[in-house]
Image (cartoon, rainbow, N blue to C red):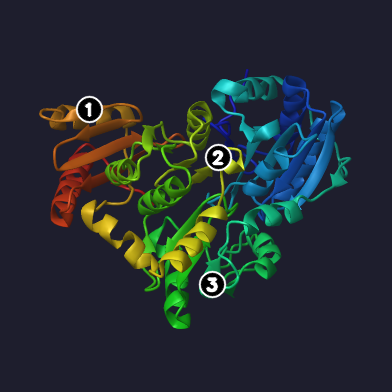
Amino acid sequence: MPSLSCFKAYDIRGRVPDELNEDIAYRLGLAFAQRFQPRRVALGRDIRHSSASLLNALAHGLAERGAEVLDLGLCGTEEIYWAAQQPGIDGGIEVTASHNPIDYNGMKLVLGGAIPVSGDSGLHDLRDMTAASTAKAPAGPAPMRPASFRDNLVHFLRHYAPAPDRKRLKIVVNPGNGAAGPLIDALEPHLPFELIKIHFEPDGSFPNGIPNPLLPENRGATAEAVQRHGADFGVAWDGDFDRCFLFDENGGFIEGYYIVGLLAEALLREHPGQKIVHDPRLTWNTMDVVGKAGGVAVQSKTGHAFIKERMRREDAVYGGEMSAHHYFRDFAYCDSGMLPWILTAKLITATGNPLSALVGERMRLYPASGEINRVVPDVKAVIAAIRSQYETGGEIDTTDGLSIEYPDWRFNLRGSNTEPVLRLNVESRHSVGLMEQRTAELLTAIETLGGTAHA
């Protein structure tokens, strides 16, 4: 049986057409319908040039096995999650490669109730069923019914915004020419904000670069627009807008780690004593904030499928990852790229404090390196070697990769799920100098073991 490298731990991603193409999409549609027996499935796509044809092939497979297919057209993953929560919808698939290079595409799959399909909940079965088939995608348009749940989603999101009589914030919004623009346009009349739109038109050629604000070189346009317009803050999204990234009133990029603490504290005010789920890469600030707010911090393995599963098990009110994925119980425990910036705007208007002040003290108390990537010849071997160098005197946790904690600093080192890349995060208590020193030491050790900068 041939292997399919596009099937990852909790989604599908690969280079088009070598690793992912219309035939694979068609076979996946057949497999999804056979494995889960859905009556009705909602499909959506991002703006990439290959997304429409992949969605059409996927729909052919689903329809051939008896599923009714609803075509949401251009939309974000968040809108598929919303659709899957609606009565009578048994599954949803977003065709997207998010922030991957322009020649990639992929798919994110959920069942009814927006329950993710991951490796231990059917994705491996779908991979094996797809790999065992040699069926070719039919020509022509697939039988689909156009549908939209956007108005209902707008109605849901607008209730999290500040009251219209509060200060009217000026906010820079940058979808990076991805899929967020149409939903923002639909939201705009219902929000008490002045929105300054840049890189707004959906464009699969990505004239301003792949929408991935985690890359420092992709932050300049948003930061400059915030400064030029005197905005209260800025927001930038990845291609399918399930992640959003915030910039303060000075154009400074705010690491997603500190937004996790900010949102956790805000939600605990409304839901005292509740649980907050976080990932293990950077933890001290989140644990401190949650503890002082009277909540319970729960650590989960990194990744949306793992976070969502743990949130459901704990009935957590909120979950956050430093990668700017934010999960909400009120949103079926799913990640939303819209709720975080709307809630942040509500905090700014309620407190009268700028974003820099809301996170500044936390950044001072727990300075962090941000995620640093290095290509290595053997991920497991390098992690083992680093462990042997650093484990003496440290507290070790292997929830996700390797975390070693000392009284005044800690680090997490984990391998990518998709490529031979190590991801390093370092944080300290109160000392930027210590964090920078330990980060430099670890990078030198990794480079000695063959690590090189990740392009």
Looking at the image, which residue is at 18% across and 50% down? 435
Residue 329: give its label: 2
Q: Is residue 229 left or right of residue 143?
A: left
Looking at the image, which residue is at 76% across and 51% down? 73
Label 1 Cα crowd, 10 Å radius (few <14 / some 14-19 / many 20+): some
Q: CA distance from mark 1 to mark 3?
A: 48 Å
Looking at the image, which residue is at 72% across and 33% down? 91
Residue carrying label 1: 396
Q: Secondary structure at mark 3?
A: loop
Q: CA distance from mark 2 to mark 1?
A: 31 Å
Q: Is residue 144 visible?
A: yes
Residue 166: give its label: 3
* Residue 278: percent from left, percent from top: 40, 38
Looking at the rendered structure, the kind of residue marked 3 is: Arg
Looking at the rendered structure, the kind of residue marked 1 is: Ile
Q: Secondary structure at mark 1?
A: strand
* Residue 6: percent from left, percent from top: 58, 34
* Residue 16: percent from left, percent from top: 63, 44
Q: Secondary structure at mark 2?
A: helix
Looking at the image, which residue is at 88% across and 43% down? 140
Which of pointers 2 and 1 indicates the residue nearer the eye?
A: 2
Q: CA distance from mark 3 to mark 2?
A: 27 Å
